[in-house]
Amino acid sequence: MKKMFIGNLPPEASEETVRAMFSAFGTVRSISVSSDIFTGKCRGFGEVEMEGHEARAAQAALDGNLVGSSDRSLRVRFEDPRDLRGGRKRR
């Protein structure tokens, strides 16, 4: 199972639209899109969890594509478990 971070989502994005984008490459296990508490609009980022080979295919196809009416390109990155540890980083 791979967890991907999705950035530069348009404000009109929802869990359904993001699921539709990623389900073309395989089964989406979980999804969360961050939304503003007052307006309900997308804050521009979210997370999608898929199987490894499906996640790699989705990342290769969707990373850098323009989404919606915005001129920003979509960013799809894998979460690195080493970055989630916190604490002081070694050099």
Image (tube, rainbow, N blue to C red):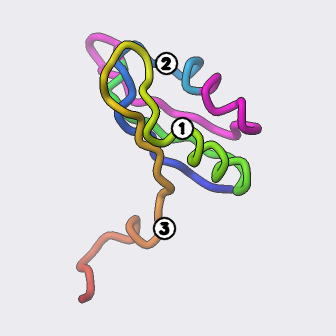
- Give the left or right position of residue 16, taking residue 34 as reference: right
Q: Which residue is mark 3?
A: 81
Label 1, secondary structure: give it.
Answer: helix
Q: Earlier in the sequence, mark 3 or mark 1?
A: 1
Question: Residue 10: percent from the left, percent from the top?
Answer: 36, 21
What whole-number distance in Å separates the C-alpha atoms at marks 3 and 2? 26 Å
**Is residue 57 placed above or below 68 in the rendered structure?**
below
Task: Using a 10 Å C-alpha cutoff, classify the residue at mark 2 as few (fewer than 14 neighbours), some (14 to 19) or many (20 or more).
Answer: some
Residue bearing the label numbered 2: 14
Q: Which residue type does callout 3 highlight?
A: Pro
Seen at 26% across and 80% down, the residue is 89
Name the residue tied to disc 1: 62
Residue sitting farthest toward the bottom = 91
- Label 1 or label 2, whichever lies nearer to me, is 1
Q: Position of residue 42 (x, y in %)?
A: 36, 21
In x, y percent, where is residue 24?
Answer: 71, 30
Specify the segment rendered in magenta: 19-41
Where on the picture, by quarter, is residue 9? Answer: top left
